[in-house]
Amino acid sequence: MAKNRRHFGIATVLIVICTFVVYWVLDSVLLKPAAAVLEAGPIDYLFDLHIWLIAFLFALVAVFMCYALIVFRSRGDEGDGEHIHGNGTLEIIWTVVPCFVVVYFAWISTTMLIDLSRPNPDEYVVNAEGRQWSWLFTYPESGAVTADLVLPVNTPIRMDLTSDDVLHNFWVPEFRVKQDSVPGMVTHVRFTPTVIGEYVLRCAELCGTNHSGMLATVRVVSEEDFQLWQSEQLAQAQE
Amino acid sequence: MSLFTLGIARGLLGQVLGMVIGMLLTCAVRILLGWEAWAAEPAWTVGAVCSIIGFLLGVGSLDDWLKWTRGIPTPLHHGPPVDKPAWTRYFSVDYNHKVIGVQYTVWGILLLMVGGTVAMIFRTELARSGLQFLGLDLYNSFIGMHGMIMIFAILLGVGGMANYLVPLMIGADDMAFPRLNALGFWFNVPGSILLLLSLFIGGWDAGWTAYPPLSARGPIGYQLFFLGVFAIGLSSIVGSLNLLVTLLRMRPEGMSLFRMPIFCWAVFATSLIQLTATQLIGTSFLMVSVQRAIGMGFFDPRGILGEVSPMVGGGDPVLFQHLFWFYSHPAVYIFVLPGLGIVSELLPVFSRKPLFGYKWIALSSMAIAIVGFLVWGHHMFVSGYNDILRIPFMYATLLVAIPTGVKFFSWLGTIWGGKVHFDTPMLFVLGAISVFLIGGLTGPILATVPTDFPLHDSYFVVGHFHATMFGGFVFPFFAALYYWFPKVTGRMYNETLGKIHFFIMTPAFWVQTLGQMGVGVMGMRRRIADYDPTLGAGQIENWQMAVTIAGFAIAFGVMLMLWNFFQSAEVGAAAGDNPWRSRSPEWQIPSPVPEHSFPAPLHVVGEPYDYGLADAGYVTTASTGDD
């Protein structure tokens, strides 16, 4: 027992060190796209929390396993190990404790999800229709119809998605959120762009031959530029 | 000896004839209806159905039942065929579970090689951005083909291990229904031939998931793919039924459920899923097949098929996903539970210590099987189904982590305090734990909906999934091949080559899976023929190259293993009856196992994993006892 206590002491220290090392490695090699919407804040926070959990659990199992393999390796003798069939207390602990962790993660995800999908009375609506292999955007407020998406910065946006043929998916990696567009129904995705710039909308649901090339440009512009662009579109439409 | 003394040759001939007859039948009906005689899609569809029946008739898997209908008795024949060389039994209908187990395993390994080759082709394409040598349509066919061939291969590998090992482990003479067992195997052959054939009549471009409306529009290859899956599904259903009955009814005196070797629990849980969920993938694919063939628009929302039938519309593409994932998520547990069972089975042998928390491990398999039925909706978080559904599916999915955690911690408890031996099977078990750990830990981040948004349908999912499949099936399967190779052949494999295989494959797989996850986080979508080289600050091509090189290293390792087995089956040293000093019943009988495995009925007198306890027996044969 005293021997086991020493083993556990060493393993605990190693686990703590290993957790930080794994977190640091994952944090530096995982190259997330830059965040360009308000919603990226909570999503990236939860992502980071998961990376901590992964780092800790990886350390926990990997350290115990490697430690046991070194310390309890057979040294050429034909003898057997200790005759232990299990430990009920331990089994209950490692069943119950994870339950709490799981429910905690599910709970914060639930509240976050409700926040992310809550309708905003001021949201600006754009319709998007996916088709093999391009997008068609219509702006109900102005009636403009475009192949590339132009959005005003710092305005809550609701995309109303549908499809002309097969399933497609609306995904801008910098916007984090993602939603299928389905023929015969309208689906929604909400986000608030916060960074002016040019992004690429990538169809993320396999949609046939040119799925990989089903891209569209997304321009997030200032409020004034957006008004200007909208009136240009209207003028063009009237010609 | 003519070629057609081999059942498989007759079967293939039967399949070709069945195909031709089915096509002629279709033409005849169309002519009678006054339509143009030839229409490719219905002709291939009916032809494919008839070809499966043709194969089964040709190979002779239905012979006995057909004789029964005429009142002819068919005593069960044991041993090699009387008037042919002994090896021919592996290519014909044979009712011995050990032969059938080998048939499953070899056919599974063949498909594993085909599926791996397909993967290597498109991995080479992905090593650099831009399209090098594959066309877009061929690429899209290949990814689906890789996925489905591998699923077939895994189901066959699972069937091979279960059929060979379960009767031996419970001391049964054979499976409960030997004829059904053979039929279960032979369904797989025409099924996989149809799947491979589909590539040559246009392929299918919607991935192995085959979501409509895309799958309702593409080339004719879809029909052969659907029917191939249907045949494999029938194999799963009859095979699992047989295993359940065998496990419940054929255990020897004294073997209570909690005294079975732990692998039997894993097979039990897997078989429950197979018996009850497989119907759903069959149904969903059949519905798409019918929608394509005769325009019944189950999944057609607004008359896309207008030209075929003016009345369609009102179908729901999302419904397909519910039906499909109700099987296809539990299917993942069909693939991994037997593998995790192998890990639990081998760890005590090579740690020389009892399995830690036997009942907990046994029941965790059942818990995974049951919770597995409640989580299919996590594949549909962004599908457009009712938003509220995301929440219960998120909770249920996260719950899977708990029984999975119990397994990991119990494995650690098994190693702790043991005397660990590092033979090749044990190395692959440890590799399995490390890889399944990566796969398991990357699950919760996909289960919580907000973090699933950026990762869903990205390459991260590809990495996660491959880690669960390699950790849950491939590594344990290889461990099982090395471990039971001496029992099956009577000879020992080459240990050095086995270790080289392990030390090439394991680090290579870590690089592969972490690389796949990495490019997914950068923003690369899954299932794309070409990717944006600017992703990940321009780093993505380096990562892709690393993944491709790692993939080739894995392929090299697998070939090394197969060469090792071929070579050792001929020249390997005699292995002896029990080279691993295991307590399990199959190691108490000669290697290779005789035609009738056990000379007398078994009696269970102790616990299966009492390593470290002197003179504690597990099984004895009755002859030493009361008579």
Image (spheres, coloured by chain):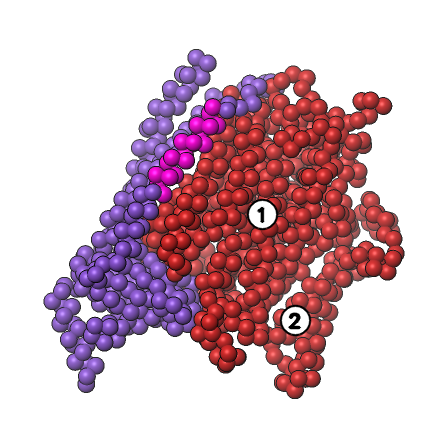
The reply to whether residue A14 is visible in this rendering is yes
Disc 1, SS: helix
Q: Which residue is mark 2?
A: B46
Letter of the chain shown purple in the rendering: A
Q: Local crowd at mark 1 within 10 Å, few (<14), some, or many (≥20)?
A: many
Q: Identify residue for label 1.
A: B273
Which quadrant holds residue B197?
bottom right
* Circle 1 chain: B
Q: Which chain identifier belongs to the red chain?
A: B
The percent coordinates of residue B25 (x first, y second) are 70, 76
Q: Of helix, strand and loop, which one carries label 2?
A: helix
Q: Which residues are magenta?
A: A89-106
> Which is nearer the eye, A25 or B548?
A25
Percent position (x, y) of residue A173?
A: 30, 56
Looking at this view, is B155 or B427 the one in front? B155
Residue displayed at 19% across by 81% down: A236
Percent coordinates x, y for residue B276 in the rendering: 60, 51
Question: How many marks can you see?
Answer: 2
Question: Overall secondary structure of the magenta stretch?
Answer: helix
